[in-house]
């Protein structure tokens, strides 16, 4: 067991702050030394690479680690999580990593730290994504696909949840999506359902262990058009037409809470990312909840569930591709629109010069989209989405907390959420009182 960091802190760790301190701060060095020492390897250097905070579930952090064993020196990517890790399947019970508990998936080591359990593994041996190992092997994929894989690139990775890789073959490009095995069949069915309805989604082939092979979908992300000229060629009507095409069979799928409906969870992550703004986040969260309660979300209809600029592919003024359909199902149209607007509104915080055209686009699109939904609900829910994105500000390379540019990014996202709340409240006054809080009224999207 590693040295205690204070049992009282662990006992009151409601929002994962202690987990962040342990895995995302300097204290991680002691943990990494213990993990490597169990294998007879010494830690030479380490750097935090990515932080994933899921309030109520746990914190997962990735580190680039340099190790030394005698005259041998190497570099690896390790991940550690305070989230629960399910026992391995019985079929895998005969093989396990040296030093790991016998009930763990292969390659996973368990460490107890001050009463908290941390599981550590080497990429790509994600304990919840067994298909990631196969998806990360060009040789294996070449055999499965019947054609050599010339290049393999990790596009996105959410530890314990999903990963996307790009495989370049001689004549085509494919994408490998890795999900938790018990969700793979339903995701495959969603792709088929949307294809049959005429939606521009990728055909999918289901392999073992939660691995799906997706054809490449043509087009450029809306993000590119926004950076070029604010996406002048495409209007919100194209997005509405796409949503109108979602088939009614989606209403039979399980309903998932929207981004906005999970605002309290996301607020916890925002407080952890900006501890100095905790009271500000709390006031904003209370106001957003009140605004959503005072507005009409509209009927339950087929929805995408995660509609944002990176998931919409364009060719000129036409939407020719729709990505990331994991969350399609019943919901409120206003939540899809708010998800899109909320994501757009934080782009200037991420890269002010690159996305200098976006504020005008947000204003233009908001005015067009509010015609079909409750305008207060649209703005309040867009604010909740923007708040949910605060914790995603850049952390890479900082020894503790956010880097200076990441701090500006996070605060800019928070300010965007506040502007949405202000706009929603101004339409309801005096039903929802104004926050007693001075805010940055500078740049960023107007709503």
Image (cartoon, helix red, strand yellow):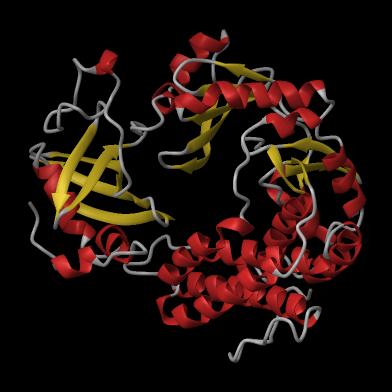
Image quadrant holding the C terminus, namely bottom right
**Which residue corresponds to the image point at 90% horizontal and 58% vertical from the top-left?**
232
Among the 4 quarters of the image, the one containing residue 204: top right
Residue 181, percent across and down?
A: 46, 24
In the image, 303 versus 150, the foreground residue is 303
Is 202 rendered above or below residue 46? above
Residue shown at the point (29%, 59%) measured from the top left: 19
Along the horizontal axis of the image, is 64 left or right of 115?
right
Q: Is residue 340 above or below residue 141?
A: below
65 sits to left or right of 286: left
- Determine whether 287 is above or below 150 in the image: below
Q: Nearer the viewer, residue 135 or 251?
A: 251
Place of residue 214 in the rendered image (x, y in percent of width and height, measured from the top left): 64, 24
x then y, percent, for residue 355: 73, 66
Q: Pick whichever, 321 or 266, lies toward us.
A: 266
Q: Is residue 247 left or right of residue 279?
A: right
Residue appearing at x 50%, y 67% in the figure? 267
Quarter assignment of residue 427: bottom right
Is residue 402 visible in the rendered structure shown here? no
How many numbered dots are placed on residues in this image? Answer: 0
Q: Quadrant of residue 296?
A: bottom right
Residue 207, placed above or below residue 299: above
Residue 199 in sight:
yes
Query: Residue drawn 27% across and 42% down?
Result: 75
* Residue 183 locus on image (x, y percent): 52, 28
């Amino acid at each position: 067991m590693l040295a205690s960091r204070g049992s009282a802190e662990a006992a009151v760790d409601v929002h994962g702050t202690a987990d962040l301190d342990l895995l995302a701060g300097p204290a991680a060095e002691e943990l990494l030394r213990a993990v490597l020492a169990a294998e007879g390897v010494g830690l030479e250097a380490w750097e935090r690479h990515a932080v994933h905070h899921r309030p109520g579930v746990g914190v997962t952090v990735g580190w680039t680690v340099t190790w030394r064993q005698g005259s041998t020196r190497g570099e690896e990517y390790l991940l550690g999580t305070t989230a629960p890790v399910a026992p391995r399947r019985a079929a895998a019970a005969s093989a396990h990593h040296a030093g790991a508990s016998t009930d763990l998936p292969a390659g996973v080591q368990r460490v107890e730290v001050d009463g908290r359990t941390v599981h550590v593994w080497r990429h790509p041996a994600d304990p919840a994504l067994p298909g990631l190992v196969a998806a990360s092997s060009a040789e294996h994929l070449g055999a499965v696909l019947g054609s050599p894989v010339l290049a393999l690139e990790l596009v996105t990775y959410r530890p314990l949840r999903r990963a996307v890789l790009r495989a370049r073959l001689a004549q085509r490009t494919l994408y490998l999506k890795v999900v938790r095995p018990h969700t793979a069949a339903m995701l495959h069915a969603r792709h088929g359902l949307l294809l049959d309805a005429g939606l521009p989604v990728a055909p999918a082939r289901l392999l073992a262990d939660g691995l799906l092979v997706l054809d490449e979908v043509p087009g450029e992300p809306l993000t590119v058009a926004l950076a070029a000229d604010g996406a002048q060629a495409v209007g919100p009507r194209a997005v509405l037409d796409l949503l109108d095409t979602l088939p009614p069979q989606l209403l039979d799928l399980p309903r998932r809470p929207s981004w906005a409906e999970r605002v309290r969870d996301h607020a916890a992550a925002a407080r952890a990312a900006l501890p100095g703004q905790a009271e500000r986040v709390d006031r904003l969260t209370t106001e957003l909840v009140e605004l959503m309660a005072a507005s009409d979300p509209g009927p339950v209809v087929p929805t995408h569930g995660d509609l944002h600029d990176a998931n919409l592919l364009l060719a000129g003024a036409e939407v020719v591709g729709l990505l990331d359909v994991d969350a399609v199902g019943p919901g409120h149209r206003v939540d899809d629109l708010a998800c899109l607007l909320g994501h757009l509104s934080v782009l200037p915080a991420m890269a002010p010069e690159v996305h200098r055209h976006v504020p005008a686009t947000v204003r233009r699109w908001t005015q067009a989209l509010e015609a079909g939904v409750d305008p207060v609900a649209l703005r309040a829910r867009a604010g909740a989405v923007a708040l949910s994105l605060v914790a995603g500000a850049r952390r890479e390379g900082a020894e503790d907390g956010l880097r200076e540019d990441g701090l500006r990014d996070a605060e800019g996202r928070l300010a965007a959420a506040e502007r949405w709340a202000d706009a929603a409240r101004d339409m309801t006054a005096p039903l929802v009182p104004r926050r007693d809080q001075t805010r940055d009224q500078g740049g960023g999207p107007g709503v």
